[in-house]
Image (cartoon, grey):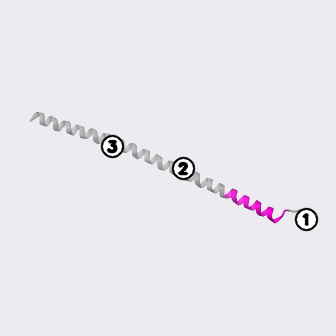
Amino acid sequence: MSGGISASTVIMGVAAGVSAYGSYQSSKANKAATAYQAGVSANNAQIAQWQAQDALQRGATAEQQQRLRTAQLKGS
C-alpha cells in the first residue's frame, strides 16, 4: 500500500459510526418509553386515589343508611 487509509480502516470507521448511531437511537427510544411509562404510572396513581376516595364515600353512605335503619327499628 502507499501509506494511505486502507479499505478495512474505512469500513471499521463506518461500522463504528453506524454502531454509535444505533446506540443513540436506542437510547432515545428507551428514554421515550420511560417517559411514557411514567405518565401511565401517574395516571394509575390518580385513578387509585379516586377509587380510594369513592370507597370511603360509599362506606360513609352505607354507615349512615345503616344508622337510619337501626334508628327506625328502635323507634318501632
Circle 3 crowding by C-alpha within 10 Å: few under 14, some 14–19, many from 20:
few
Mark toward the start of the polypeptide (1 vs 3): 1
SS for dot 1? loop
Q: Is residue 19 left or right of residue 47?
A: right
Q: Amino acid at mark 2?
A: Ala
Question: In whole angstroms, how far apart are the C-alphas of marks 1 and 3?
Answer: 81 Å
**Residue at label 2?**
35
Residue at position x 62%, y 53% from top?
Answer: 27
Query: Residue flagged by tag 1: what amino acid is it?
Result: Ser
Which residue is at 68% across, 57% downward? 21
**Residue 49, image x, y percentages:** 39, 42
* Image quarter hosting the C terminus: top left
- Quarter of the image holding residue 11? bottom right
In the rendering, at what x and y percent does residue 25 appear? 63, 57
Relative placement, left or right, of 39 versus 57 is right
Asked if 39 appears above or below 4 in the picture, the reply is above
Marks 2 and 1 sit apart, C-alpha to C-alpha, by 52 Å
Quarter of the image for residue 5 reads: bottom right
Residue 43 part of the magenta segment: no
Binning the other alpha carbons within 10 Å of mark 2 as few (below 14), some (14 to 19) or many (20 upward) gives: few
Q: Amino acid at mark 3?
A: Asp
Span shown in magenta? 5-21
**Label drawn at residue 2:** 1
SS at mark 2 in the image: helix
Mark 1 or 3, closer to the camera: 1
Question: Pointer 3: what residue?
Answer: 54
Q: Position of residue 2 (x, y in %)?
A: 91, 65
